[in-house]
């Protein structure tokens, strides 16, 4: 690591708290990436899921700090084969005082398939659900198509909203016989509540801030702060300056070049946790011609495994981690990180071998390279622009005529969803705390109808991988399921289906008088924040 030894220790574990006084009524948080909607079902992306955790409870909570599943809107549950019975908490009430019911749960799970214009759906989380039937107003039974070992983890990602009707829908894999799915705009402008959570959104101004107020009718433990203001500060220097000046109390996505500065400030602290998010480049493996490649007579060289392997060999991951990321990351050769269920420890590191990269390009017919523009966001991931610049230089060193384009995330992912890139920087975590959801999202063949391959915008496709993941979905034995996930990753590894770069370490910085808890999902869990003792 390039940082000081003392600061590196701070990244391994949270720093000690220092004793000054914080305002107990308001917490101000500077966030690098803001939510693009209040609607809890609109977009499966980190900032939206982070906000959802605070304002729209799911049936259960997947605690990615302790690794346990905890009750939320479901106070208890039991499973018998493929049938899961959930008893709902009668104390959980919506803003109008109405208790959560089976009708609300069925509506919410049906709505996941029917959110208008969703750029990234939650459908893969309900892939195994076959039927849902109410048992009175306060209980329901979910039947799955086969044994589902991760149903609870999947359900933990879906906030429950209030149904427009008290009559439960007939659950199916289409529209459940319903046409009123509530508009995302209605959630965003506050005319519809996002659900039941420790906080309620009282103001949402894109590009400025999102204001949360304590939900005094919340059925669980009350959050410590009455008011939380999430300030959108995508620029790293501005976010650090806001913390140093006292403009905010907490910031997320601490840039690596600020670690030592924060550690040396006795009024501040670093809080961190290993994160499941993989940062990667994806290759366009379908378009021909590919939109950002020229000089190939219309051919898409990225469809050739030799070219994809060459580009992987051209990247010096050790240098990326040690220099560009200043040691605050872990080199990646595969999708799932080492401490997440389903990781494959037998896959060797991808070597840095520019000589072999050139040989492979020549073998594939590109001895003189080709011209390509790679794409990256400028404000989504820690050091995203710097990482993309480094990779651009590495590819140029093996003969690719390469340039870089960057966009703010507000337009970047829309273009990715329209397949406008040939090679693009992305990130994806294990949203359920295990590897199956991450692999279904990233490497399963895209299937919008089923919500599979939602983040697979390079359109990698392997029948073998799909089969392994489908089998894993219904395999209860954990070791057998682990083996299936490991084999799927081995296939992707041999295909060079992606360019995995590194797994992030999640780092926050806070005032010394604020207790803030880290988690592997990199969510801002605001209801556990409190003044430090």
Image (cartoon, grey):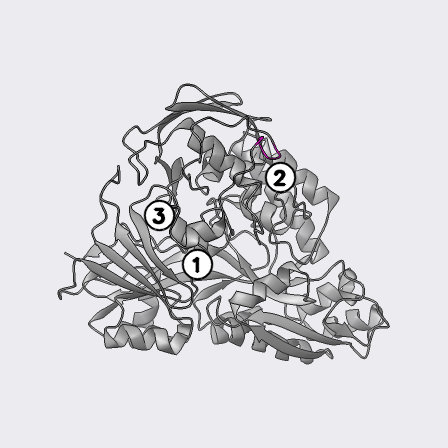
Return the x and y of residue 225 as percentages of the image width and height.
Answer: 21, 54
Residue on which the image places disc 3: 55
Q: Quadrant of residue 367?
A: bottom right
Q: Residue drawn at (67%, 67%), measured in percent from left and top? A: 423
| First reached walking from the N terminus: tag 2 or tag 3 | 3
In the structure shown, which secondary structural element does the residue marked by tag 1 occupy?
loop
Tag of residue 484: 2
Judge left or right: residue 29 versus residue 431. left
Return the x and y of residue 182 as percentages of the image width and height.
Answer: 49, 43
Q: Is residue 4 visible?
A: no
| First reached walking from the N terminus: tag 3 or tag 1 | 1
Q: CA distance from mark 2 to mark 3?
A: 35 Å
Residue 508 is inside the magenta segment: no
Query: Badge 2: few (under 14), some or many (20 or more) residues near its Cα, within 10 Å?
Result: many
Residue 174 is inside the magenta segment: yes
* Foreground pick, 183 / 517: 183
In the image, residue 208 above or below residue 489: below
Return the x and y of residue 13 as percentages of the image width and height.
Answer: 31, 59
Residue on which the image places disc 1: 35
Tag of residue 52: none
């Amino acid at each position: 690591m390039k940082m000081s030894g003392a600061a590196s220790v701070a990244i391994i574990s949270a720093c000690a708290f220092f004793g000054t006084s914080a305002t107990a009524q308001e917490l101000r948080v500077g966030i690098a990436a803001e939510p693009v909607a209040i609607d809890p079902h609109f977009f499966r992306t980190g900032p939206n899921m982070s906000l959802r955790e605070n304002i729209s409870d799911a049936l259960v909570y997947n605690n990615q700090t302790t690794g346990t599943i905890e009750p939320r809107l479901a106070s208890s549950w039991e499973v018998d084969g493929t049938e899961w019975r959930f008893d709902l908490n009668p104390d959980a009430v919506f803003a109008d005082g109405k208790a959560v019911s089976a009708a609300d749960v069925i509506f919410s799970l049906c709505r996941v398939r029917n959110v208008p214009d969703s750029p990234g759906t939650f459908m893969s989380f309900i892939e195994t659900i076959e039927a849902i039937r109410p048992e009175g107003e306060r209980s329901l039974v979910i039947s799955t198509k086969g044994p589902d070992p991760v149903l609870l983890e999947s359900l933990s990602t879906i906030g429950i909203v209030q149904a427009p009707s008290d009559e439960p829908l007939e659950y199916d894999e289409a529209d459940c016989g319903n046409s009123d799915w509530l508009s995302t705009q209605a959630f965003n402008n506050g005319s519809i509540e996002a659900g039941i959570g420790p906080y309620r959104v009282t103001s949402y101004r894109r590009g400025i801030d999102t204001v949360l107020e304590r939900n005094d009718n919340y059925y669980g433990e009350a959050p410590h702060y009455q008011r939380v203001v999430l300030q959108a500060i995508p620029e790293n220097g501005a976010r650090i300056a806001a913390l140093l000046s006292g403009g905010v109390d907490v910031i997320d996505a601490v840039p690596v070049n600020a670690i030592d500065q924060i550690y040396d400030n006795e009024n501040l602290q670093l809080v961190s946790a290993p994160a499941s998010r993989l940062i990667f480049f994806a290759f366009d493996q379908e378009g021909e011609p590919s939109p950002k490649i020229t000089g190939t007579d219309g051919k898409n060289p990225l469809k050739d495994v030799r070219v994809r392997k060459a580009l992987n060999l051209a990247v010096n991951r050790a240098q990326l981690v040690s220099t560009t990321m200043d040691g605050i990351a872990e080199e990646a050769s595969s999708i799932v990180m080492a401490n997440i269920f389903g990781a494959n420890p037998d896959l060797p590191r991808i070597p840095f071998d520019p000589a072999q990269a050139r040989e492979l390009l020549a073998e594939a017919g590109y001895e003189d390279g080709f011209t390509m523009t790679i794409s990256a966001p400028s404000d989504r991931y820690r050091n995203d622009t710097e990482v993309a610049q480094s990779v651009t230089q590495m590819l140029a060193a093996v003969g690719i005529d390469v340039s870089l384009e960057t966009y703010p995330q507000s337009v970047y992912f829309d273009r990715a969803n329209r397949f406008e890139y040939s090679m693009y920087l992305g990130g994806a975590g294990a949203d359920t705390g295990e590897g199956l959801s991450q692999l279904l999202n990233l490497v399963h063949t895209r299937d919008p109808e089923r919500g599979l391959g939602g983040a697979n915008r390079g359109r990698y496709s392997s029948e073998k991988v799909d089969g392994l993941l489908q089998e894993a979905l219904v395999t209860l034995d954990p070791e057998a399921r682990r083996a299936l996930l490991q084999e799927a990753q081995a296939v992707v590894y041999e295909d060079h289906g992606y360019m995995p770069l590194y797994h992030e370490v999640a780092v926050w910085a806070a005032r010394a008088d604020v207790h803030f808890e880290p988690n592997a999902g990199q969510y801002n869990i605001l209801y556990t924040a409190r003044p430090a003792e």
